[in-house]
Image (cartoon, coloured by chain):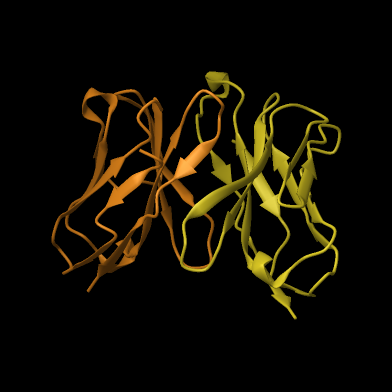
Amino acid sequence: GDSVTQMEGPVTLSEEAFLTINCTYTATGYPSLFWYVQYPGEGLQLLLKATKADDKGSNKGFEATYRKETTSFHLEKGSVQVSDSAVYFCALLPAYSGAGSYQLTFGKGTKLSVIP
Amino acid sequence: DTGVSQNPRHKITKRGQNVTFRCDPISEHNRLYWYRQTLGQGPEFLTYFQNEAQLEKSRLLSDRFSAERPKGSFSTLEIQRTEQGDSAMYLCASIGANTEAFFGQGTRLTVV
């Protein structure tokens, strides 16, 4: 079945540092790919998405590019802020139900802490 | 309506009792998911509805869990004979035509 693997956390960075959180996936065809963020005590929020190969999703200074050749969707931000401290989840949604699943599949999450 | 609504936000129940949670999705969304999330873990898929049809259910899901979505609008998730291992955050999400899933704030269940 489909799966998502993302780098283990926690990740601790100083403010203004560069952030990369790796995400790779296994799926049939061309799934849609997402990054979700969960701030402390809050629900899951969509951060960005990409629906086809070479698409770049971006939002709030975060970016991720859909790489079909490496089955990856790594999250990057050039300069993190304390307010970016949260748990980040990579996820995929199958392109079609032919593979037998409609699941929106999540990785285990990466906790990011940004210190002043 | 600006989002997915879940009720109650918190539920404490004694082991062996039945509980029911409700999810009201974004009105024009025809796809609805239930997930379970425990501390430090990613959301775990429970079940999926397209309109009123339950099209997929996790193979790991105990038969004590059941979900409905009458008329393709709100959905309910019932857990019968609760166990301490059922303690978790239960999340509902709905998806519209653009494939973006919107999540509710969740229902936190504590089984004592």
Q: Position of residue A94 (x, y in %)?
A: 59, 29
Q: Quadrant of the C terminus of chain A?
A: bottom right
Residue B56, image quadrant? top left
Above-or-below relation of B33 to A39: above
Q: In the image, is B13 to the left or to the right of A54?
A: left
Name the residue at 53% across, 21% down.
A97
Horizontal side of B3 relative to B9 (left or right) equals: right
Residue located farthest toward the left when viewing the structure as drawn: B17
Which one is nearer the viewer's eye here, A108 or A84?
Answer: A84
The N terminus of chain A: image quadrant: top right
- Taking depth in this image into account, of A34 and A84 the one nearest to the observer is A84
| Number of marks | 0
Measured from the top left, where is residue A110 in percent x and y?
66, 62
Left or right, B54 with respect to A79, comes to: left
Identify which residue is drawn at 62% across, 24% down: A95
Q: Which chain is orange?
A: B
Q: Is residue A107 above or below residue B93?
A: below
Task: Tell me the colour chain A is drawn in.
Answer: yellow
Looking at the image, residue B109 sits to the left or right of residue B42; the answer is: left
State the image coordinates of residue B94 (x, y, percent, origin top left).
Answer: 42, 36
